[in-house]
Image (tube, helix red, strand yellow):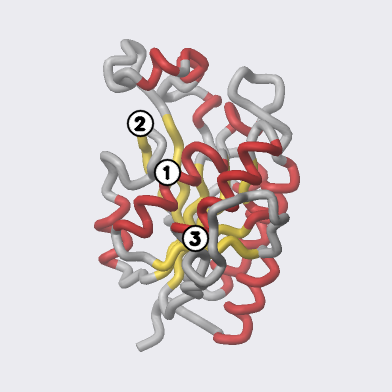
């Protein structure tokens, strides 16, 4: 990605090297649930473009029979499983288990055996079995789509790196409630944790390499 030169203290020779896509990429669609995709909710924003790019990614990953996962965030009625998170962000009280608010948006709904991983905090790795799933499927690259760039996408990108995965974030397939946090966190992810690219670049790579998780 081409970034404006308004971030001091980063030497291009020491930050932001490309890790690229490996042989076994998986797509992780983060929190594109109704509470976040409906701009009329306290947690939501207009992420129509993000949904459209995510749909393109899903179509291609399905065509290549590559792993796809979704996440949602939902809490029990007592909020005993929300810890201090719900104190810090009271709007999370909208996310009750079993309600339509925590269902994946119908525009990119899971199909067949695509899993929706339930999480309680920002990272898709924290307190979930995502790592086990990725290991089972021999995944070496995690492509992240969804919301929000400054929250759950960033947290997952950091953990993805720490678990040893090549981490790819298509900038047009992630979104936030404000442009400033969105751009700042994309810059930081690209500098330290993964490659910030475009959806077109990911699709072109998959097309050129005809990657399949079932290849030997």
- Look at mark 3 in the image and give the residue it sits on: 27
- Compute the Cα span from label 2 to label 3: 20 Å
Say whether disc 2 or disc 1 marks the residue closer to the N-terminus.
2
Q: What number is the disc on residue 174?
A: none
**Dividing the picture into quarters, in which one does residue 208 lie?**
bottom right
Is the C terminus in the top left, top right, bottom left or bottom right quadrant? Answer: bottom left
Query: Tag 2's secondary structure?
Result: loop
Q: Residue at x 59, y 23 (%)?
A: 43
Q: Residue 155 shows which numbered tag?
A: 1
Location of residue 150 with respect to 55 vertically, above or below: above
Disc with the residue nearer the chain's start (1 vs 3): 3
Residue 116 x/y as whole percent: 42, 45
Classify 10 Å Cα crowding around label 3: few (below 14), some (14-19), many (20 and above).
many
Q: Give the farthest residue toward the front.
A: 9
Q: Nearer the viewer, mark 1 or mark 3?
A: 1
**Residue beneath the point at 26% across and 39% down:** 127
Whether residue 65 is visible, yes or no, is no
Mark 1 crowd level (few <14, some 14–19, many ≥20, 10 Å Cα): some
Asked whether 149 or 11 is in front, the reply is 11
Q: Which x, y percent locates residue 36?
A: 60, 31
| Quadrant assignment, res 131 | bottom left
Residue 120 numbered tag = 2
Is the N terminus in the top left, top right, bottom left or bottom right quadrant?
Answer: bottom right
Camera-side residue of 142 and 210: 142
């Amino acid at each position: 990605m081409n970034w404006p030169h308004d971030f001091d203290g980063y030497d291009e020779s020491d930050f932001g090297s490309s890790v690229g896509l490996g042989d076994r990429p998986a797509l992780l669609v983060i929190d594109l649930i109704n509470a976040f995709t409906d701009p009329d909710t306290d947690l939501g924003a207009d992420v129509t473009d993000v949904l459209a790019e995510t749909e393109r990614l899903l179509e291609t990953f399905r065509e290549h029979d590559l792993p796809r996962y979704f996440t949602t965030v939902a809490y029990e009625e007592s909020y005993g499983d929300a810890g201090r998170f719900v104190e810090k962000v009271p709007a999370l009280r909208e996310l009750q288990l079993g309600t339509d608010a925590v269902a994946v948006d119908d525009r990119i709904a899971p199909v067949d055996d695509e899993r929706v991983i339930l999480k309680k905090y920002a990272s898709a790795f924290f307190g979930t079995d995502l790592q086990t799933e990725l290991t089972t499927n021999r995944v070496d690259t995690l492509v992240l789509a969804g919301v929000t760039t400054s929250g759950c996408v960033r947290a997952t990108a950091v953990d993805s790196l720490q678990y040893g995965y090549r981490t790819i974030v298509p900038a047009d397939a992630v979104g936030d409630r404000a442009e400033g946090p969105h751009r700042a966190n994309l810059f930081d992810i690209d500098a330290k944790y993964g490659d910030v690219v475009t959806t077109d670049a990911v699709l072109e790579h998959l097309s050129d390499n005809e990657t399949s998780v079932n290849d030997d």
